[in-house]
Image (cartoon, rainbow, N blue to C red):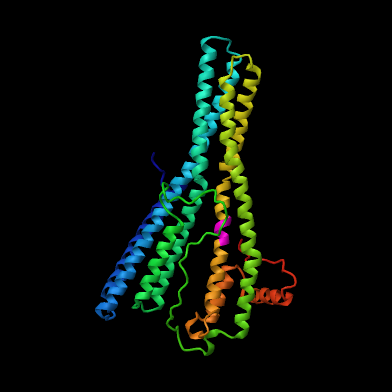
Amino acid sequence: MKLEPGSQAQQQWRENERGGEQELRERKMRKRRCRRSIRATANAPKTQMSPPEALVVAKFYAIMDVVADRVEMHKNIGAQRDNWNHLLLTSINSITLTAATMAGLATTGGTGAPLVALKVSSTLLYLSATAMSVVMNKIQPSQLGEEQRNAARLFKQLYREMQTTMSLYKVTNIDVINEAMEKVLALDKAYPLPLLGAMIEKFPKTVEPTVWWPPKRHRRLERLGEEIDGNGWDGKSEEEMREIVEVLKRKDAAEYLRLSQKALKVNKILAISGPLLTGLAGLGSSFLGTTHGAWAVMLAVIAGVLASVVNTLEHGWQVGMVFEMYRSNAGFFRLMQEIIESNISLREVERRENGELFKIKVALQLGRSLSELKHLAALSSSRNGEEAIEEFASKLF
């Protein structure tokens, strides 16, 4: 198509061409700046370290590489197990509804070979759906996906924490290496990758918060900047932190444990009901064409439809994922309690984390400002244990 000189289409074409050339020039400029930055980093003077210090730093970087790899592993496996949930739910419901349709058609198919074919096919489909439903309810794919998402997030958090450590402190102490390895192994134990032998129990007898951290060990932190009197701590700050711990115990952790128990009970009922209904439907379809044919077809069709509804409620609404989410939230509040208690239990304030920095971390992790955190502590303290406050410590969830 030939464009007329001076036409609007030709002007638009020229403007697009100039825009493309400008974008190409900008890309080339970004590439040049990136190369200069790499050369400057490579030519920058290196800090002289002794061989033992260089070895500690190399070990720390090796652990960081492993953590980065764990992030990708858990992310990929989490996506895979999400696919399991969607595919298995669709397959089981399709098989169940097909079997129910065959059972209904068998009553209108007369006698002889058509009846036998529909009857046998419906029974086999129901038995297959029962077996698949038992396996799916045992492994709980939605819960498996939530576990892997939590693991990926926590490994990312650990990776950023290690980057911050490298930026702010001089990593020359072997205790830092041991602590990082303990955190990696604790996460591996809390969120295992394999299914056989190491899978977390999906229907535990007692519900406990998820624990993904190693036992707290105190190590002296290097000072950031000049020495501060009291290291940012005083009697009032300690009392505020104690009140925050009490609120976390009484309200947040207890509430999410209660919700976890409710979600587990609902999930157990649904996990038992699904295979039971498909089994009953299969039993009903096996009696089609007999003297009890009327009751048999009602059982086969109605139980099959109810089984599809139950499977959709359990796996479509991802009740297992909800249970794991509540249990993980309870674990987060327990971790907050341990972090606060481990700091205020140290008599030597020099060994604690800086008080001002610590309060900022606690406030942000609870979704509060510093003034709101003080108000919560004052509100809890004013009750003097006579009446529990109605407000939760966390505003995030």
- Judged left or right of residue 51, residue 122 is right
How many numbered marks, from 0 up? 0
Taking the view exactly as shown, the residue that stands out farthest to the front is: 205
Q: Where in the figure is residue 185, as x and y percent of width and height?
A: 40, 62
19 and 12: which is toward the camera: 19
**Residue 299 drawn at (x, y percent):** 63, 25
Verify whether residue 329 appears in magenta: yes
The answer to whether one can see residue 350 in this image is: yes
Q: Quadrant of the N terminus?
A: top left
Residue 392's place in the image compared with 326, above or below, is: below
The residue under the point 60% across, 24% down is 300
Please identify the quarter of the rendering in which residue 62 is found: bottom left
Question: Image point 58% across, 36% down: which residue?
Answer: 274
Q: Which sits in the foreground, 86 or 140?
A: 140
Magenta residue check for 21: no
Q: Is residue 149 positioned above or below 136 on the image?
A: below
Q: In this view, does 140 lie above or below 285?
A: below
Expressed as whole percent of the image width and height from the top left, the position of residue 9 reads 45, 46
- The answer to whether 214 is drawn above or below residue 151 in the figure is below
Where residue 22 sits in the image (x, y, percent)? 38, 59
Residue positioned 71% across, 74% down in the render: 379
- Is residue 21 toward the left or the right of residue 384 in the image? left
Q: Which residue is drawn at 56% across and 66% down?
A: 334
Q: Quadrant of the C terminus?
A: bottom right
Give the extent of the magenta segment.
Answer: 326-330
Q: In this view, does 346 lie to the left or right of 296?
A: left
Displayed quadrant of residue 188: bottom left
Relative horizontal placement of residue 32, taking residue 107 as reference (left or right): left
Residue 44 in sight? no
Dominant SS in magenta: helix
